[in-house]
Image (cartoon, rainbow, N blue to C red):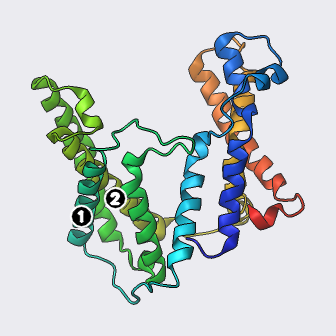
């Protein structure tokens, strides 16, 4: 959560990087259009300077952090709150789903707020998770997560994914309802999908957090070494992924094999580059 200017600085650096590096797009455009133009020629006609791409969430976090810092001194959050019960968590998911449904009446799925790349249809859950995360940290809710609670939500997630989700599309197909209704609007499909998203997402989150706390809550030298560079790695990883993809673009092998080559190499090289970036003067203070 927002604990000072360092997080906000890191968010702003990532956002500015993504807004000012058309080199991320140049290789892909060249491959799709079979263009032989140079990078400078590409820049001459480039008009998409503010486009966060996959780093839109950094801009969102920066916005959330700013709002939190502005309002934190005025409104004190309650302390010593117990971890909510299973039913309370599910009702919270339903509430977020209903708010999402109302938001999608105005901002349907696919509507993007330019230039920051926000899909406002999903923002109720982002705001809710950010706020609950602050309360959870202050009241040590993660320490109170039991393995039993995690198993309960894991079962709920299984039902939602393997029963409710297919049933939703079967009913839609049988009744010949338009698939576009899922994107938003005053209809049952949008409402059910909004509720499904929140109940499923929150159930999976709690199940993973609970399992991780009881089984993966360990550290070693390897993970500690690269944990510090996760943020810089994410900011820089598009360069690595695109670069490796371009290198193998003309290699005549099955796409799946290319994926098996590029994916692990991208992860390894991205972490190495992210780690080395932190050694630059001042980088460790803002990333």
Q: Is residue 165 visible?
A: yes
Q: Residues within 10 Å of mark 2 (few under 14, many from 20)?
A: many
Number of marks: 2
Q: Is residue 159 above or below residue 261?
A: below
Give the image quarter of residue 22.
Answer: top right
The residue depicted at 46 percent of the width and 65 percent of the height is 130
Which residue lies at the image location 47% right of the left edge and 74% below the top edge?
134
The answer to which image quadrant residue 208 occupies is bottom left
Secondary structure at badge 2 equals helix
Disc 1, SS? helix
Where is residue 271? Give x, y as percent: 73, 49
Q: Which residue lies at the image location 47% right of the left edge and 64% below the top edge?
A: 212
The quarter of the picture where the C terminus appears is bottom right
Give x and y (percent) for residue 143: 44, 79
| Direction bottom: furthest residue | 80
Q: Is residue 265 visible?
A: no
Q: Are marks 2 and 1 in contact (CB under 8 Å)?
A: yes
Q: Which residue is mark 2?
A: 202
Task: Please tell me which of labels 2 and 1 falls first in the chain.
Answer: 1
Spot occupied by residue 242 in the image (x, y as percentages of width and height):
70, 30
- Give the camera-side residue of 210 and 181: 181
Residue hosting label 1: 90
Query: Cα distance, mark 2 to mark 1?
Result: 8 Å
Position of 164 relative to 221 (above/below): above
Name the residue nearer the viewer: 280 or 5: 5
């Amino acid at each position: 959560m927002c604990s000072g200017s360092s997080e906000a600085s890191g968010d702003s650096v990532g956002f500015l990087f993504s807004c000012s590096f058309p080199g991320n797009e140049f290789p892909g455009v060249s491959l799709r259009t079979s263009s032989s133009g140079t990078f400078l020629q590409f820049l001459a006609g480039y008009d998409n300077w503010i486009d966060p791409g996959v780093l839109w969430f950094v801009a969102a976090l920066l916005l959330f952090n700013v709002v939190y810092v502005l309002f934190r001194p005025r409104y004190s959050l309650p302390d010593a709150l117990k971890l909510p019960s299973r039913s309370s968590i599910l009702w919270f998911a339903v509430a977020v789903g209903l708010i999402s449904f109302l938001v999608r009446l105005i901002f349907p799925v696919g509507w993007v707020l330019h230039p920051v790349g926000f899909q406002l249809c999903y923002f109720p859950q982002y705001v809710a998770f950010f706020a609950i995360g602050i309360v959870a940290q202050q009241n040590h809710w993660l320490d109170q997560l039991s393995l039993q609670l995690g198993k309960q939500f894991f079962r709920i997630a299984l039902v939602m994914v393997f029963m409710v989700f297919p049933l939703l599309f079967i009913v839609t197909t049988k009744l010949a309802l338009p698939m576009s209704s899922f994107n938003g609007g005053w209809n049952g499909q949008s409402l059910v999908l909004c509720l499904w998203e929140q109940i499923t997402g929150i159930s999976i989150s709690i199940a993973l957090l609970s399992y991780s706390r009881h089984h993966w809550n360990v550290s070693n030298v390897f993970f500690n070494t690269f944990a510090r560079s996760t943020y810089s790695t994410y900011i820089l990883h598009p360069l690595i992924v695109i670069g490796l993809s371009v290198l193998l673009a003309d290699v005549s092998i099955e796409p799946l094999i290319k994926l098996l080559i590029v994916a692990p190499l991208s992860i390894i090289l991205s972490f190495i580059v992210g780690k080395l970036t932190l050694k630059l003067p001042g980088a460790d203070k803002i990333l």
